[in-house]
Every structure is written in structure tokens, then in C-alpha cells.
Amino acid sequence: MVRLVDIARRVGVSVMTVSKALRDQRDVSDSTRSKIKKVAAEMGYVPDSGAQLLRTNKSKLIGLVIPTTTNPVFARMVFAIEQRARELGYDILLTHTQNHSEIEETCIRRLLSRRVEGLLIAPVYRMESSVRIYKELLVRKVPVVLLGSPAAFCSQFVCAQSDDIQASFLATKHLLDLGHRRIAYFTGPLAAPWAQERFEGHRRAMRDAGLDVDDHMVFHAGATIEDGTKAALQMINEHCNATAVLAVNDMVAIGCGVTLLQQGVNIPLDISLVGFGNVLVSEYFRVPLTTIRQPKFRLGVAACDMLMQLIRGESVQSKRLSAELEIRASTAPPQKH
């Protein structure tokens, strides 16, 4: 292991000078600082983070709490957060909750024990108005930024989210503009605010077109491909005669699409299909999926920058980033009979 004293001997300066140079302090000349950093890199010097923590009380660590990286939305967001944190001189400690509240609490406590300077959390949504671990974070004044919409139990924290109401409004309006009037809607998890907002956007677009949302055209799905499959089978069995389906996310839309194709339904001639999220597989689905292009990378960068502001003690406001409609082959005007 390369020590400061080893670098000092090689360069011919004091250990204190090496320490100051590597910390970019001003009382070391530019030429000496440059030489010390070059020698340190050649020798493979790695700073002792434990010693740095003792000296500055700054761990340079950010805790990141998400459901799972197998979710393509979070995979892209994590990439952005890690890249932005590295640019700012921070490292990421990543944990997965698997969407279980007990695991979420354990993850947060473990990260706090590692002396992280702040937390980025994609909450495990539930119906309770108060959750112990979030109350503790508030009392301890831990810098926290939520990845996504806040629920009642975490509404005191700032968040970075996409404008899901407006985005869903655009998706529904696209179908209405094509001439669809019987639009089935596949809803998401009941406790998730983002799912509620996407349904609200759909409802507003229908209302603006002078139409009511028919309860018989609303199917509870969830968030996975399997959920989309089940909802599609229910829709087929109930003969609701929908000419289009708007799903709460791309995974649900793809599950629906697979089921419809297996049943001999032509997409989009028999029924149009729209997702939400623009995950990679949506573009390469058997019928490329019309969807909402969610700003996943920009959300990750924004959340990281907001957390840095909180860590510095600055005031921060929540952010909503706009999303765009991506029209592909899965939507077309309804057939006239």
C-alpha cells in the first residue's frame, strides 16, 4: 500500500506538502502540486477514506435506495446518478429493497451506519400516513431526495419526478386524435402516487374531449409484464370492445401486447397499444411500442444535484421534468366497421 511518506521521499518534499497538494490547498505551488499528483498516480496511491472521514467528517458517500436494478427505469437512473456523483467527487453505496418495507428500513439504517452524507430513495409505497424510518430521517435532518412522487408518509422530503399527469394526458390525447373513443386503461399499484397521477392525466384528457372514463374500461394491472398479461386476459374475457389500450408503464403494455398477439389480435389494426417509460425493450418489441419517453437520465442527474445542494445546507425545491410522446408502430386509427 502506497503511503504519503513514500510519495514524499520520491518527490523530495515533506509529508505535509504531499498531503496539502493532494487536497489542492493553495499554499503549494502549481508546479509542485502537479509533480506530486503525477508521482502519486504513477505509484498507484489511493486515498485512505477512513482517515479522510476522521479528518474532515466527510465520507464522500451517497446512499442510493431503489427497488431493483432489473427495473430498466431505475437502471438508467442509477447510471446517471453514479456518473454525476463521480464528477462531484462522491461514491455511491447502492442497496435494493425488492419493494419490501422491512428491507427498505434495513437498507436505510445500514447506509446511515456507513456515515453517508445523504440519501437518494425510491420509496416503497404503502398506504400508511406515517412511517417510522422516514420520521427518523426527518428528525435527524438527513439530506434526502426522493426518486419519484412523494406519498403521504414521505411528503416532507423534496423529490425529482417526471410530470406524469401531463405525459399521460399527451398519451391519451394521441389516441383521441387518432379517433379512438373506447380506450381501456390498465392502472398501476394502488399505493403508488405515480400510478395515480398517470390515471389522472388520462382522465383529464378524456374529460377535455367531452368523454367520461367508463369504469368497465379500467383494469387493475400493477407494474410487471405478468400483471399486463392478466389484465389483458380479463379485458378479453369481459368483451369491453376497446379499440385502444393505455397502460401505466411499458412492462404492463408489453405483457398486454404479448397476450393480444397470442390471441390473434392485430396491433394496431384491431387495437392500438400505448405504454409509459420508453424502456429499451419497448422499441424492439414485436410491434414497436408507442410510449412516453420518461427523462430517466435527466432525473438521475437532477436528483444528485439536488442532494448536493442539501448537503451544502442550501434550500432546494422539488423538480418535475417534462416527458415526451414517442410514436411508433403500435398505434393507428381504429378500423371502421
Image: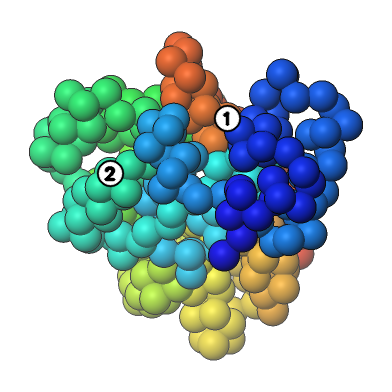
Q: Is residue 126 left or right of residue 164?
A: left
Q: Amino acid at mark 2?
A: Leu
In this orientation, which residue lies closer to the viewer: 45 or 336?
A: 45
Q: Amino acid at mark 1?
A: Asp
Q: Residue at x 21, y 26 (%)?
A: 140
Q: Is residue 270 visible?
A: yes
Q: Residues within 10 Å of mark 1 (few under 14, many from 20)?
A: some
Q: From the viewer's perspective, is residue 241 above or below residue 6?
A: below
Task: Quickly name the residue at label 1.
Answer: 305
Taking the spot 70% from the left edge, 61% from the top edge, the residue there is: 44
Mark 1 or 2, which is nearer the eye? 2
Q: Is residue 165 visible?
A: no
Most extreme residue toward the top, as rendered?
315
Give the mark nearest the N terminus, 1 or 2. 2
- Tell me residue 70's x, y (percent): 48, 69
Task: Using the image as rendered, state which of residue 80 and residue 249 is in the foreground.
Answer: 80
Label 1: which secondary element: helix
Q: Quadrant of residue 32?
A: top right
Query: Image quadrant for the C terminus?
Result: bottom right
Foreground: 105 or 111?
111
* Disc number for residue 105: none
Percent of width and height locating residue 189: 30, 54
Rounded to the nearest angstrom, the CA distance separating label 1 from label 2 is: 20 Å
Q: How is the image coloured?
A: rainbow
What kind of element bears circle 2? Answer: helix
For label 2, count other residues whose C-alpha is less than 10 Å away and answer few (under 14), some (14-19) or many (20+): some
Residue 230 % position (x, y): 35, 75
Whether 316 is drawn above or below 307: the answer is above
Quarter of the image for residue 325 reads top right
Residue at the disc numbered 2 = 112
Location of residue 79 with respect to 225 vertically, above or below: above
Q: Quadrant of the N terminus?
A: bottom right
